[in-house]
Structure formats: C-alpha cells, structure tokens
Image (cartoon, helix red, strand yellow):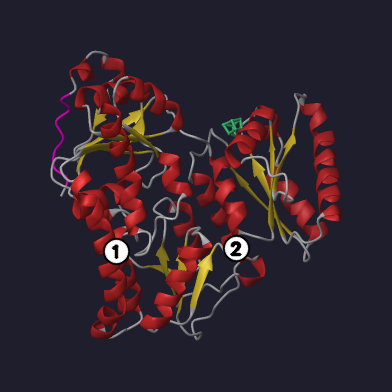
Amino acid sequence: MIGEITLTAPEAGCAPSRQPEVLRAGVIRERGQREVFCGLTGIIWLHRKMQDAFFLVVGSRTCAHLLQSAAGVMIFAEPRFATAIIEERDLAGMADCQDELDRIVDRLLTRRPEIRTLFLVGSCPSEVIKLDLGKAAQRLDVKFSPSTRILNYSGSGIETTFTEGEDACLTAIVPEMPAASASDAANLLVVGALPDIVEDQFGRLFAEIGISNVGYLPTRRMADLPPVGPNTRFLLAQPFLTETTGALQRRGATRLDALFPFGAEGTTDWLRAAADAFGVDPMHFNRVVAPGRERAKRAIAHRRERLEGKRITFLPDSQLELPLARFLATELGMIPVEVGTPYLNRELNARELALLPQGTRLSEGQDVDLQLDRVRFDRPDLTVCGLGLANPLEAEGLSTKWAIELVFSPIHGFEQAGDLAELFARPLRRRDVLRV
Ligand code: SF4
C-alpha cells in the first residue's frame, strides 16, 4: 500500500511558488513544464494495427517532422498516414481552408479507394484550432460514407500527451461499434492496441479457457468491429484508456477490474478476471494458464539476479508507469523510488496501486526541473524517461531507459514477460560493461 510521502529532496523547499503540492493521499502533483511527446505519436502504432485506416494529420511542418522521424520514412510501402500542412492565415481564410481540406480528402480517397476509415487528426497550431475538424469530418462523412467513414480526434500537444492519442482515437471509434442488445450472448472485449502476435496469443488462451465470443478494439479491419451492449464485459490491455472506458460504459459495457497483463502474475490476474466473469471453472482455468505462467516465471527468473534490489524511477510519460513498477517490484524485486505518471487514474489503477511497495513516491503531472532535482538527489540505478531527458541524465552518470521503447515493443502476456524484464536489465548490463 502507498503510505504518506516525505519529500526528501533538499531542493524541494527552495522555490515556494513552484513547490509541488503534496496531497493527503501521498501523491506529488505538479503542473509545470513537461517533457512528453504529444498524442500524434499514437499514429505510429495505430496505423500499423488498423490496416484499412488512414490518419490525416491536419497540422504544421513540426507535426509532419514528428511523424516522419518517429515512424521512419516508408519507401517501399504506401504509408497510411500523412500531414496536411496548414500555413498561417487569418479567420477570413478559414473557409478556403475547409475547401482545401475537402480537395485533399477527395484526392486521397480517389487514389486510395481501399481506405475504409479516414481519421482527421487535429494538432496544436492556432490555424488548426480555428478550423472545426469535427464539422469537417461530419461533412466529409456524408459525402464518402458508407465506403469510407470519416472520423476525427485530436492529437494536439495542448490537449494530449503521448498515449492519450490512442485513447482519443478509440473514443472516436466507439460510436461506430454495432449495438448488442440485452438478449444477445455475453461477449468479451479486449481494449487497447496490441501487436497482432500478442492479440493472437491471447485469442488462443481465451479459446482454451472456454471464452469464444472475444473481440478487440481497435480491430485490424474496421468492418470487424465487435458489438457492444449491456452484456459486454471489457478488459483494458492498456492503462491509459480513461476516455475510451467512459465511452464503452455509456454504451452499457462493464469493465472487468484486473491487474494489467504484464509479467506472469499480471497476465494471470487479467485472464482470471475474464474467466470469473464468464463462469469458467477455476480448476480448468488454472490448468490452461499453468504452462504459460511457468514459462513466464522461468524467463523472468533469468533477469532477476541483475534487477533484484536495484532502485528505479519512472518519469511521467506513457501512463504505463504504475503497472510496470508493480511488475518490477513484485516479480523482480526492484525498488521503485518514484513512479511518475502524467495522469493518475486511481480507479483503473486501484489493483496496481495496492501492490506497490510501502514508501513508493508517486507523482502526477510534471515540473521537469523539480523532478530532475529529485532524480539527482535519489540517484536511482535506472531512470525510465523520455528521449530528450535520457542523454543529459546519462551524461550525469545515471542509467536510463527510453519510455517510448516500452510502448513500441511487445510486452504484454506470458510469452513477452522475459523480454519485458530484459528491457530493464539491458541498460544495467551496459552500464556494468562500460564500467569494467
Ligand atoms: S501536435 Fe503540437 S506538439 Fe504535436 S507535433 Fe504538432 S505542433 Fe508539435
């Protein structure tokens, strides 16, 4: 359980106006400068997952650069994302802007008729904020539906951080899901983009457990969107889906409370929540999951020697921080010093919070200078942080792990548990080698 937090960094009291607010529940809340990618980043894994969707960012050259450098330039494949760059113009010019957007969409869909869903993705430049993309999506949807649905969401860095782009995208998809009625058979929905290989592994496990009516959000093809209704039970595969959770609940679905499927124990708990909800015999469940669970435990044990007793700090980035800290603490014996997260959703993370070791410092939001002061004071063995902070911390002799790697790598489920542990072991091994 999380206890009261004593902020021990000496610098914490130096600047009263910027002092973090320490809540009664023992969480440091900061609302200062943050170092996190914006929600456009989600397009990089979403466009790979949703094979008949296209993401058209309406933004600036900066947005285009972000996407190109993060996703790499695809020379051999037709990309499924692009940026419509809006140059500076006054309000009077916004009508032209809408016409231009219509022309771009027209040209795109004529050239790429296989696109079934086109997402107009908003960004932060003031020109884009002036443009009503919701209305544009409605107008274009009337024109191109049903062959292509036009949806819209925002990936703007003003409104979203890093993984919130996926949350906004899935929230936009929920109204497109077919309705299931109260008389329909219960179905299970797995929510959150997973690499296909991981989705297939879970699919096989659910089938062996005896749950056959399983759907995924997002789906590889939009035509395969599963139904949602009062008999839908859903499991979150990712902890950053607050808005999507609300949208599904408003359509009558019920969230199954579970640990997130990281490591042997997290994955078992996650699968068990579904098994319990679907009335699966516990003995049968244990028999089915035992081999995968044992494989995961063995794979994790190989990394335990390097990680056990090591102190780790997470800077707020992907919202995966809490479940990952729980995994590292309970299955690898690591000591979380500070676990920072951009937003702390206590409800979705209740089970995770309960398993974090006593004395773990939690922080929500960021004031990057204050947070770096605490890292320098704590000097953890490993700091998980964004790309921009990693090199300066390495230069100060602190080992780091890029948070973005944890989002881009397959890390869910039994078969990936060893790889997940390895992602944390590798920087420590590198540090030891460099020291020799
Ligand atoms: S959406 Fe905003 S933060 Fe993101 S790349 Fe574009 S300008 Fe930058």
Question: Looking at the image, is 173 positioned above or below residue 3?
Answer: below
Q: Secondary structure at mark 2?
A: helix
- Secondary structure category for the residue under label 1: helix
* Disc assigned to residue 296: 1
The total of numbered circles placed on residues is 2
Q: Is residue 44 visible?
A: yes
Q: CA distance from mark 2 to mark 1?
A: 37 Å
Judge depth for marks 2 and 1 and give the one in front: 1
| Front-lying residue, 233 or 299 | 299
User: Compared to 303, does 253 lie above or below?
Assistant: below
At 53% from the left edge and 50% from the top edge, which residue is drawn? Answer: 166
Count neighbours of disc 2 (C-alpha within 10 A) and say few if under 14, some if 14 to 19, many if 20 or more: few
Whether residue 345 can be seen here: no
129 part of magenta stretch: no
- Quadrant hosting residue 5: top left
Residue type pointed to by label 1: Ala
- Cβ of mark 2 under 8 Å from ligand 1: the answer is no
**Residue to which mark 2 is pinned:** 175
Q: Position of residue 163 (x, y in %)?
A: 48, 45
What are the residue bounds of the magenta stretch? Answer: 2-8
What kind of secondary structure does the magenta stretch mostly adopt?
Answer: loop
Residue at the farthest top position: 14
- Residue 64's spot in the image, x, y percent? 67, 34
Amino acid type at circle 2 is Pro
